[in-house]
Image (cartoon, rainbow, N blue to C red):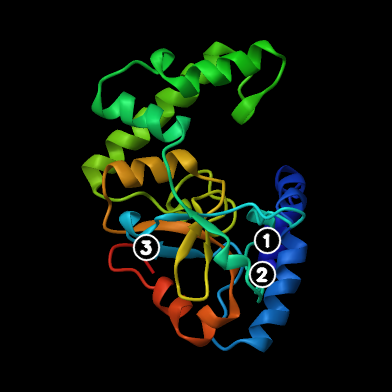
Amino acid sequence: MKKFLFYAHPKRLHRSIEAQVPHKALRDLVNSLRFKDYLPSDSPIFVPARDVRYSLKRRPGKVMYRRRHSGAVIGGDWDLSRREITTNDKFESCRMRYFDGAEWPETPIYKRLLQEIAEGKAPDECRSAADLDARYAALDKVFEETRARGRLLCKSEMPDQFRREHGGILLHIARDGTCLRSGGGVHRFAIARLLDLQEMPAQVGVIHPDAIRDGHVARLRKSSFYPG
C-alpha cells in the first residue's frame, strides 16, 4: 500500500506513467515466477567501469531497448548486435573539461546543445544558456564529489531518487554476462570511465535468459562498495 501511495502521489503520477511503472510491476511479477534469480526492473547492478566496452548496436527494423524495457527477459540474438564503445561528444567534452581544463562553452557538447536551444529545442530539459550553465555546474560537483569519494552514488542515495536505480547508467545484460551500454546516464558513465572506478552502479536494462541461467545476473547484483 505504501508503494502504491508513493507512485500515486500527484507529483509522481506523471513520472510513474512515463517510466511505465505499472507495466514494469506486472513484468516483475511474471518473471519472478519464471526465473529463480530474476532481477526486478530498475534494480541496480554493479560493474567495473573499464569492463563496459560495448554498446548495443541498433538493428534495422528492430526496437532499440531503452529504460522502459528494464527487467525484460528476452531471448534471441539481440545481444550479439554490439560494437565497441567509442568516444562521443559528451565523453570527449568531459575529458576536455576535467583533464584539459577547458571551460564548458569550449566543449563540443555545450556548443551542440546551445545550437539546439537556438533552434527552439530543449535538450536535456535546457531552454537557455543559463540552464546549460546550471546543468554543467551540477555535473562539475558530481565529478569532484565522485573523485573525492571514490565511487558514484547510487540513485537511492540521492535526493531525487525515484525508483531503485531508474535514471542511472543503463546497461543491458548479454548471455555471457557482458554489460552493454544503450543511452541513458552518458555523463555519469563518462565520469566513471575517466576516473576508472572499480565499481559503478547502473540501472539494469534487458536481460538475456542465459545470463540468469548461468549466474551472471546473481554476480552483477552484488557489490563490494555499495550499501545493500
Query: Which element carries disc 1, helix, strand or loop?
Result: helix
Q: Nearer the viewer, residue 70 or 142?
A: 70
Residue drawn at point x = 40 percent, y = 27 percent = 93
- Does residue 134 show up? no
Chain-order first, disc 3 or disc 2: 3
Q: Is residue 85 left or right of residue 112?
A: left
Residue at numbered disc 3: 47
Check contact, mark 1 vs mark 2: CB within 8 A.
Answer: yes
Determine the CA span between mark 1 and mark 2: 6 Å
- Does residue 8 show up? yes
Kind of residue sitting beneath label 3: Val
Q: Where 200 sits versus 131, above or below?
A: below
Residue 72, labelled with which disc? 2
> Residue 209, percent across and down?
59, 80
Q: Is residue 79 left or right of residue 192?
A: right
Quarter of the figure that contains the N terminus: bottom right
Determine the CA span between mark 3 and mark 2: 20 Å
Q: Is residue 113 left or right of residue 60?
A: left
> Residue 90, percent across and down?
46, 32
Kind of residue sitting beneath label 2: Ala
Chain-order first, disc 3 or disc 1: 3
Determine the CA span between mark 3 and mark 1: 20 Å
Residue 69, labelled with which disc? 1
